[in-house]
Image: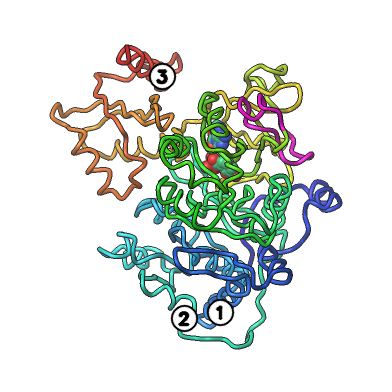
Amino acid sequence: MTIEFTPWPEPMARRYRDLGYWEDKPLSDVLRVSCVKRPSATAIICAHRYFSYTDIDRLSNNLAQSLLARGLKPYDTALVQLPNIAEFYIVFFALIKIGVVPVNALYSHQRLELTAYAQQLHPTLIVASASHPLFSEGSFLEDLKREIPSLQQALIYGENHYADLLEDGLNFPEQIAQLEPTPAGEVAFFQLSGGSTGTPKLIPRTHNDYLYSVRRSAELCGLGPQTRFLCALPAGHNFTLSSPGALGVFDNGGTVITAPDPEPFNCFSLISQHQINMVALVPPAVALWLKAAEAHRDKLATLSLMQVGGANFAESIARRVPEELGCQLQQVFGMAEGLVNYTRLDDDDPLIFCTQGCPMCPDDEVLVVDENCQPVPPGETGMLITRGPYTIRGYYKSGEHNQAAFDAGGFYRTGDLVQRDGNGYLRVVGRQKDQINRGGEKIAAEEVENLLLRHKSISQAALVAMPDDLLGEKSCAFLVSSDPDLRPLVLRKYLRDLGVAQFKLPDKFKFVRSLPLTPIGKTDKKKLRKVLREKAVTSKV
Ligand code: J2J
């Protein structure tokens, strides 16, 4: 039994090992090293609760043993949906330690997303929170168990019963079973793809590739025991987990402070209360923080590094970060599939404000190519394709999609349009993939279009991005409908009832007689986007 994934070709795997990128250690090594070096240091602060490294190790061992006792075994999979709380990490480490392979759904995900992941993974275990409406009302869990026969075990934690999870009724004074992660060259867990297709894709990440990504990121960002990192974006997102994120902080004996979301007033209080010095944000959150800082900048005195990534970040806002928030800015352009680019801490201002950084690894192979796959000259726009020691070679069980998403040489087609300067620094200037980036939250157009097309009166649907001052992009659905009385309110309710995450609901609906077509007969989304852009300009004048 193993978990399927597309391996790197043997010569490349050997090279990555020879160069020391792949250490053949489990991902839980990040916890082990700090348990040895700084056992009593605070690893996590979650509201009023403080957890030392020893606490996290003991609690995750406890849960691991308890799960083994319940019959979980290596190569089982788990569907996890937890908010930004200490248990997110305890569960993550517990599963990794026993070779159970989790996927972390976003807390904003609803029935459709969780079901789609479960259908692909056939998990044995689900870990979720009773404070989520899906698990506090209705029959979702029973329905899911019925649909997915492999799903035997559910750990659902009520807000006041999280302690049950940690002790789980069984306190193991000593390890009774050997804890055995999956081999380091195999899948440790699944990341989520922002996606551009009808069904959300799962990204198999191996211990080796992910640990490298975490450790190299932490080195590049200067993490150490002094790091006090605010985790305010979803804990499971690749950015906050690995760039260098919480795992990078754990590896260096620092402290992670959890916040439910990036809402500035709560975050500012946490920063001053816990002397936080580092945070990772998406651009819309930065805009809110800038506004809030007008009156409360004194609370940010300890903040020294703000990482910004996930979506386009306007230069004009970037320049305001050091001036108005009093901290250094680092731009991060990454993807859950692998490649992460950073501006370096000692870069000059023009690079920090105007670029999204350069790849973190000398062996990241990055090409900027035209339609014919030929490299474009420096400074010109092209499609970014990449391969390297921590970029996947294929999505989970997606043979057909992988044919399109990866080229014959194993390069991942990111779908991003970039310009690269003579020194390898990238600027993200657009996108080729059919995706909307709503302030860092990714929406696969096809997924929402398919849901809209399930409505009996809708015969054609196209979801496109429209400009938005705060979020950068919002979504607009162009629809051909046989019902002249169909209203946005009704459609939103219809979509919500189908069980889709709130952030995927179109922000605007436009009813049209027909959709414009390209010469080969596909919906001409360029034309639709142009209509929306022109509208935005005229309505502003
Ligand atoms: C413009 N677009 C960006 C940026 C990502 C670190 C940081 C972010 C992510 C992430 C991540 C961008 N400017 N600075 O995984 O480890 C868009 C691109 C990219 C897609 C990936 C990390 N940073 N993007 O955002 O998997 O289109 O990862 O291909 O969610 O976000 O999205 P995701």
Q: Report the quarter where the N terminus lies.
A: bottom right
Q: Residue at x 61, y 27 (%)?
A: 353
In the rendered image, the vertical position of residue 339 relative to residue 10, given as above or below: above
Q: Which of label 1 and label 3 is nearer to you?
A: 1
Secondary structure under tag 3 reads loop
Instruction: Tell me the quarter of the picture where residue 157 sits.
Output: bottom left
- Is residue 115 at all visible to an observer of this figure? yes
In this view, the residue in front, 125 or 211, is 211
Question: In the image as oriented, which residue stretches furthest toward the right?
Answer: 18
Q: Residue at x 22, y 28 (%)?
A: 481
Is the CB–ligand 1 distance for label 1 below 8 Å?
A: no
The residue that label 3 is drawn on is 524
Indicate which disc, 1 or 2, sits on the residue closer to the N terminus: 1
- The amino acid type of the residue labelled 2 equals Asp
Q: Are marks 1 and 2 in contact (CB under 8 Å)?
A: yes
**Residue 255 image offset from top left, x and y in percent:** 60, 60
Crowd class of label 3 (few under 14; some 14 to 19; many from 20; radius 10 Å):
some
